[in-house]
Image: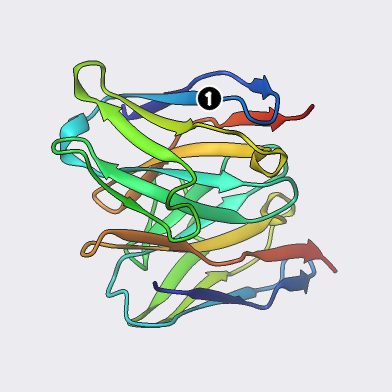
Amino acid sequence: EVQLVQSGAEVKKPGESLRISCKASGYTFTTYWIGWVRQMPGKGLEWMGIIYPADSDTRYSPSFQGQVTISADTSITTAYLQWSGLKASDTAMYYCVAVIGGEGYWGQGTLVTVSS
Amino acid sequence: EIVMTQSPATLSVSPGERATLSCRASQSVGTNLAWYQQKPGQAPRLLIYYVSTRATGIPARFSGSGSGTEFTLTISSLQSEDFAVYYCQQYSDWPPRWTFGQGTKVEIK
């Protein structure tokens, strides 16, 4: 059974750094793209970027290029989403998603709150 | 970048009626098109992938159709649990890009 389990909710101050994680299981982690999706409060789904764990090929949505870093550790089948300087506007729910044979498998979401 | 446009933004439907949701891509996405349902406080739930394949456990009242740039999600007879927001998503193979539509809210009339 494919499972994506994300790290817990975070509360941070503006300017702080953060890395959230997505632990994958039930499929060959290196074989499929895994991505991150943002959902701001009361808003729609926004694709942030995807990574191919086998070679770390990473593609970002133009809206998020330079704003976040996506990475993966194949030894522990985990994908990461990282910020080096959070802003209040980064407050959102973040989902990891793997598309396997056309089917999207989603993590449960990580709520990130940035507030002074 | 491929832009996905959904219409209408809001659809008011009575229980038991048919609902038709549209999704248009700015360029062809082939068959790499999925539909999701999202209820408040929940992660999106996959309904349809590869345009018309129902995901495991999805009732037959949900169906997808279309090709190239025009796609449709049809809910044949709306049940109370179907009132939610629906998103289409393209997941092109190369270059690898994903994009979501802005969503259609299906509300009770």
- Of the pair A112 and B99, the residue shown nearer to us: A112
Q: Quadrant of the C terminus of chain A?
A: top right
Which amino acid, mark 1?
Leu
Residue A110 appearing in the image: yes
User: Percent position (x, y) of residue A23?
Assistant: 37, 22
Residue at x 56%, y 46% (from the top left corner): A38
Label 1 crowding class (10 Å Cα cut-off): few <14, some 14-19, many 20+? some
Is B81 placed above or below B105 here? above
| Residue A52 % position (x, y) | 22, 42
Question: Which residue is painted at 71% across and 63% down in the image?
Answer: B105
Please state the horizontal and vertical placement of residue B47, each as a whole percent of the image. 47, 54
**At which x and y percent is residue B92?**
29, 64
Q: Secondary structure at mark 1?
A: strand
Q: Quadrant for residue A44, please give it.
A: bottom right
Using the image, determine if residue A41 lies above or below residue B51: above
Report how many numbered discs are placed on residues in the image.
Answer: 1
Q: Is residue B24 left or right of residue A98?
A: right
**Drawn side of residue B27 relative to residue B17, left or right:** left
The chain containing the residue under callout 1 comes to A
What residue is pinned by disc 1?
A18
Q: Quadrant of the N terminus of chain A?
A: top left
Depth check: B63 or A58 in front? Answer: A58
- Give left or right: position of B95 versus B73: left
Horizontal relation, residue B84 to residue A77: left or right = right
User: Where is residue B71, by image quadrant?
Assistant: bottom left
| Nearest the eye: A108 or B84 | A108
- Residue B15 visible to an observer of this rendering: no
Q: Is residue B23 above or below residue A41?
A: below
Q: Residue at x 64, y 40 (%)?
A: A90
- Given the current orientation, which residue lies at the most extreme right position? B109
Residue at x 27% of width, y 75% of height? B30
